[in-house]
Image: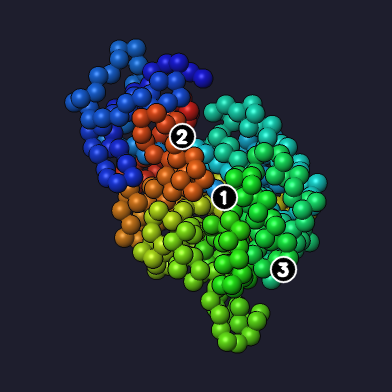
Amino acid sequence: MSSSTLAVVNGVVISPEKIVPDSAILCEGNRITRIGKMSSLRIPKSAQVIDAKGAYLSPGYIDIHVHGGNGADYMDGTERAIRAANQAHLRHGTTTIFPTTTTGASAQLRKMIQATKQVQSKWTPRDGARIGGIHLYGPFFAPDKVGCHSPKGRRNPSSKEYVQYFESGIIKIATCAAELPGAVPFYRRAKRAKCLITCGHSNANYEEMQSAYKSGMRHVDHFWCAMSSVRSIRERLGVPMQASMEQFVIANQGMSTEVIADGCHLAPDLLEFAYKIIAPDRLLLVTDANRALDCPPGHYVFGPRETGSPFESNGLVGHSPGDPSTLASSIMGMDHMVRTMKKGTTASLPEVIRMASLTPATRLNIHHETGSLETGKLADILILSKRLTVKTVILDGRLV
């Protein structure tokens, strides 16, 4: 940890509620020590000074649903792959990341968990984004909602399998389709591990969601993607038509959800609907990015390199081989999600930044450490252009 003083001056601070021009931020070591107007803040002569030249100062982004980048998938299960992906996402402004599993064999998940723990234990800012924990996402999906994940690696939850994952101590987010046999015991075990518990890749109805909620489930993965609808539940259970995950999230103030704002998964009208109906304190931005992030268009594998699902990148989004009308995860970083959400909705800039920082931090109960620019919090700071491109990243008090 550095003990030097870092000063970011002449910036426009984006707080959760407002924008504050002519501001400066002082950091000692890896913590923010003072924030204020330039006229009232004394900059020590020994400080390393970074002149923001009127650019925005934003908290670092937090991504709770992300599969890889720079040619690497977290399920490759190597320290090299994890660092490559984390370094790529850091360039796009993500300073805290939750590597996310896909479907796959238990041995592949254990390998990914072990490699992630190794990188986390030896982490420095040179390794890329800080690892906040692992998102145990696959393999407990509904058979009819597997999406771009390999169906061969999908299965129902079994305590003999998932207990070992939770015992690793690094699982902080846990996903399971609510309608699966064994879902409720899974949620209860995840609750004991103090995870953010989510329902994803699911065709659950309202009653199944209520049961999951009673067991600790509080979040739904990528809204409108691989999730139940009134129509899909009718196909599954017949008439009368029943409410779905969408209605449950909208009706229940205890629930949060997330959107992939890459411009390919959801049109601006859906992003606007989510912003207005769900609101920034319950709506998160995620990348759901795969290994094709920062790579040229071409053919790739989603999930473990040996057994994952093939997909194509067209430079804008992943899709099934030979079928551009399908979706196979995002290939964009969080900076792109922020720009798309700001351009495509009526959300204010502080609200958009909140969805990429403080809201995920609050849902994961790490908001006392990160998620906003406040005295005492980690010095994870982005300098953003007026077009919201990442100009400079400060991670853990270091210019990276």
Relative to 241, say whether 211 is above or below.
above
* Among the two numbered marks 2 and 1 on one chain, the one whose residue lies closer to the N terminus: 1
Q: Which residue does the numbered mark 3 point to in the structure image?
A: 143
Q: Which residue does the numbered mark 1 point to in the structure image?
A: 196
The residue drawn where x is 36% and y is 64% is 276
Q: Residue furthest top?
A: 46
* Among the two numbered marks 2 and 3 on one chain, the one whose residue lies closer to the N terminus: 3
Q: Is residue 103 visible?
A: yes
Q: How many marks?
A: 3
Task: Report the amino acid beneath label 3.
Answer: Pro
Q: Residue furthest left?
A: 39
**Between 106 and 174, which is closer to the camera in this rendering?**
174
For numbered disc 3, what is the local secondary structure? helix
Determine contact: label 2, label 3, CB under 8 Å: no
Residue at mark 3 to residue at mark 1: CA–CA distance: 23 Å
The residue drawn where x is 49% and y is 48% is 363
Q: Is residue 361 left or right of residue 78?
A: left
Residue 180: x percent and y percent?
70, 66
For numbered disc 1, what is the local secondary structure? strand
Q: Which residue does the numbered mark 2 point to in the structure image?
A: 369
Relative to 241, say whether 114 is above or below.
above
